[in-house]
Image (cartoon, coloured by chain):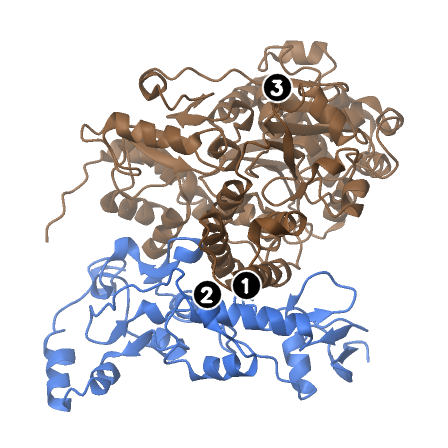
Amino acid sequence: MEDSISLTIDGTEVNVERGTTILKAAEAAGIEIPVLCYFAHTTANGLCRLCVVETEGVRGMQAACVAEASEGSVVHTDSPGVQSARKTILEMLASTVDLSEAPELHKLMQRYDAQPKRFEGGKRRQPEMIDDNPMYIRDYAKCVMCWRCVQVCAADAQYTYAIDFSGRGFNSSIGTFFDKPIPQTTCVFCGQCVGVCPTGALKGKREFLFEQGVAPEDIFQVTRRNGKNQRSLKGPHLDRGG
Amino acid sequence: MTTKTHVFDRETLNAIVDGQSESGRTALIPALLEAQRAFGYLSEELVEQIGQDLRVPLAEIHGVIEFYSMLYRRPVGETIIRVCTSPMCAMVGGEEACTAACDHLGVERDVPSQDGRFMVEAVECLGLCDHAPAALVGDTPVAGIDPREPASWIASPEEAPPGVVDGDLRWLTARCGVIDPTDLAAYERLGGFQALKDAIKDLQPEDVVETIKKSGLVGRGGAAFPTGLKWEYTAAAPGETRYIVCNADESEPGTFKDRALMEGDPFSVIEGILLAGYAIGAKSGYLYIRGEYPRARRILSEAIGRVRDAGYLGENILGTGFTFDLEIRSGVGAYICGEETALFESIEGKRGFPRLKPPFPTTHGLFGKPTAINNVETLCTATWILANGVKAYRAKGTEKSPGSKLFCLSGDVERPGVYEVAFGVQLQELIDMAGGVTGDLQAVLLGGAAGAFATPAELHLPMTFEDLQAAGLSLGSGVVTVINQERDLMQFLVSLAHFFAHESCGKCFPCQLGTQRQLEIVGRFAEGEAKKGDREALDDVGFAMTNASLCGLGMTAGTAILSAVKKWPELMAD
C-alpha cells in the first residue's frame, strides 16, 4: 500500500497511514505515551513536551503529538533519556503551579518518580484567584499554560477572542485585553474554556461555590441576580449593526 | 473606578493606520510602533482604536504588546535609557551604571521620572559589546558609559563611534569605515552592484544557486546550514509567491558583526538580498532589524531609498524584467525573534513564538509561503562570492569551512571589535589580532550565550566549524568573549542564566520552566547557598532543555552553563 508506512516502536512493528503522528502510531501498537497539552479537539502545538520520544538517528527528542511517524524509523517511547526529560519537566511544573486538581499529572509523577522538592524555594506562579463574573472563576495559580482555553476561545472553536496571553517566558499567563474583568471582554460565556481546562484553573462558578460549601439557594443569588444586565460594551454587537 | 483618558489625536492616528486595514495583521506591529512614537505609549483607548481600524481582536493585541519588551501599555519617560546588563557589559560595570543612572535621576528601574522626561531600564545585550559598558539613550547608542558620571551620558549622550573593524582578510568589510555608508556612487566605484548586474543580465536564477552551492557557503547566524541548498529548496517549492527574508535580529549576546556590516556597508546587504531574491524567484523581501539597532535601521532605510532611486529596486530592474521590492521591519525587543520561524510570526503581527518544524521555511515560511531566510553576513558573503567567484572564495579557509568569517571580539581584549579573517586561524591569533588579553586569561566564551566555554589550553584550536565541533565547542555566530582572571566567572554565568530566563518565549515547558530554574540554581551557587542535589538538578534541567525543547533557543539555553561546570567542576560542586 502506497499510503501506508511501517516503523518500529519500542520493538513492535507498526503499520500506519502516512501522515499519522507518532502518538497515534504508538496507540495503534497499544503503547501509551503520556500527554498534557495535547487534546483531541484542539490544534496540537507540542508545548508540554511530556510526549517526547527518541528516534534512532535523529538529534534531540520529538514531540509525539505532532511529529509524523516516518517509514523505517525506530522509535523509543520510554528510553532512559525520555524518562529523565519527563521527570524533570513534571518536577519543574509541580514546583511552579498548584497541581492539586490534576490527578492525571499526579499519576504521571508517580510513574516517573518525580521529586518536585528538588526545586523547592524557587519562583512559583501564584496570582490571586479572579472571581469577576457569574459563570466561572479563574485560578491561574493552577494554570499550566497548555493553551487549550485560548485555542477554543479563538480559531479552534468559538472565534470569540476574549482571552490571550500576558507576559513572556516563566512569567507567562492567560490574560484579557488590558486585564479587564471578563464581563468587559468579548466573552460569550460559552463555557468551552472551562470544559477543556485540565487542571481546575478554570471552573464553573457554581461548582466552585458548591465545593466551598455554599448552599444552592445562595449560589442562585450570586450567579444569577448579581450578574444581571452586566454585558460587554466592547467589540461587535449584532444589535448595533455588528 | 475612573481611569484618566489618554488623549491622542485621531488625525495623527489616521495617518498611521490609513489604508492598512486591507494589509491585515502584518500591519499591526508597525502601527503599534508608530502610534507609540507619536503618542508616547499604547493606552487602552489608543489600542482599542487601532484594533478596530486594523480589525485585530483586542485580546490578541494585548498578547502582542505583552510579548515585546519595547512596547509599552503604561506611560514611559520621553527618553528611555536602556542600560545593557548582559554578560559582556555586566562584566565591566553595566549593573553599576544602571544603578547610577537611577540614582542620578532619583527613579526606580522601569518607572518614569516625575517630570516624565526619563525612564531607566536594565536590558539584555544591545549588540554594543565592543563599546561595553554601553547604553541606548533614546535612539542614541552610547559607548563606555561611566557609572561615576551618569549625568554626562544621560543629559548629552554622545553617539558611539562605529567601532573597530579590522582583520587580515578584508572581503566583506573592505568598505566598512572606508566609504560613507550611504554613498551609493562610492559603493559602485568599489565594485558594488556589479554582481547583481551580471546576475540579472547574464545568469539564470539556477546558475546563481549553483554558484553558491559550489562555494560551500553556510549560514552565519549560528546554525551553519548550507545557503545554496536553502535557496535551491525554496526555488523548487511549489507556489507562485516566495519571500526572501534577511535576518538582522542579531541578538545573541556578544554578537555585533551584522551591526558593523549594516552600519558600514549597507548596500552589500541590500545587494545580497536582491541576489537571493533573484535566485529563488522572490518578488519581495523583508529586512528584519532588531529594535535595539536604531542606527543600523536609519542607515539601511536611507540606503534603500538611494537604491530605489537608482533603479535597483522596484519594477523591471535595470530593464531586465526582474521585479523586486524590499521592506524594513523593526524588531521590538525579543531575542527569540532571531529564531527564523519566530521572526516570521513577528512580521505577521503576532507574538514571537517559534513554530513547530517540520514544515520548514523553504516550503512553509513567511505567510505560509516558501521562504529563504538568511543572516546579514551570509547575504554579504553571497554578494562577495558572486562578485569574485567560487575559486577566489575557496582559496581561503578550509575545505569544510571555506572563505572568510567575521568574529566579534569582546571582553578582556585590548581592542574589542569585529575582525574578519580566513577560517582556520587559531583562537590565539584572533585574540592577538585584537591586541591580546588584558590581564591573565581565565576563559573564552565561543559562540555567544548559546555557545560554550574554551579554556586557556584550547587557544591553539583552529577557528573552523569542524575543528570547534570536534572539540565540543561551537563557532555559532562568531562570538569570542575573553574573560580574564579578575572576573568572577560565577557572576558571568548568572548573567547568562538571567539572559535566557528573560528571553524564553514561554511556549514549551522545558525552556519556560527550565530557564527560570537554571537561573535560581546558578544564583544559589554564586551566593554560596547551594543545596544538596543542586548540581544534579542543574544537569537534569540542562538535559531536559537541550533534548526536549521546541526550538533552538531552548536547546541551547543550557549549553554554556553545562560546558562551564564540565570544565571547571569546582565552580558548582555539591
Same chain for the residues under marks 3 and 1 in the image: yes
Q: Which mark is residue B415?
A: 3
Q: Residue at x 67, y 13 (%)?
A: B187
Element marked by disc 3: loop
Give the chain letter for brown: B
Q: Earlier in the sequence, mark 3 or mark 1?
A: 3
Question: Depth check: B495 or A212 in front?
Answer: B495
Q: Is residue B77 left or right of residue B316?
A: left
Question: Depth check: B457 or B308 in front?
Answer: B457
Question: Depth check: A62 or A78 in front?
Answer: A78
Chain of the residue on which disc 1 is drawn: B
Chain of the residue on which disc 2 is drawn: A
Q: Residue A123, how many percent across, how many down?
A: 38, 60
Q: Which residue is mark 1?
A: B537
Q: Which residue is mark 2?
A: A119
Q: Colour of chain A?
A: blue
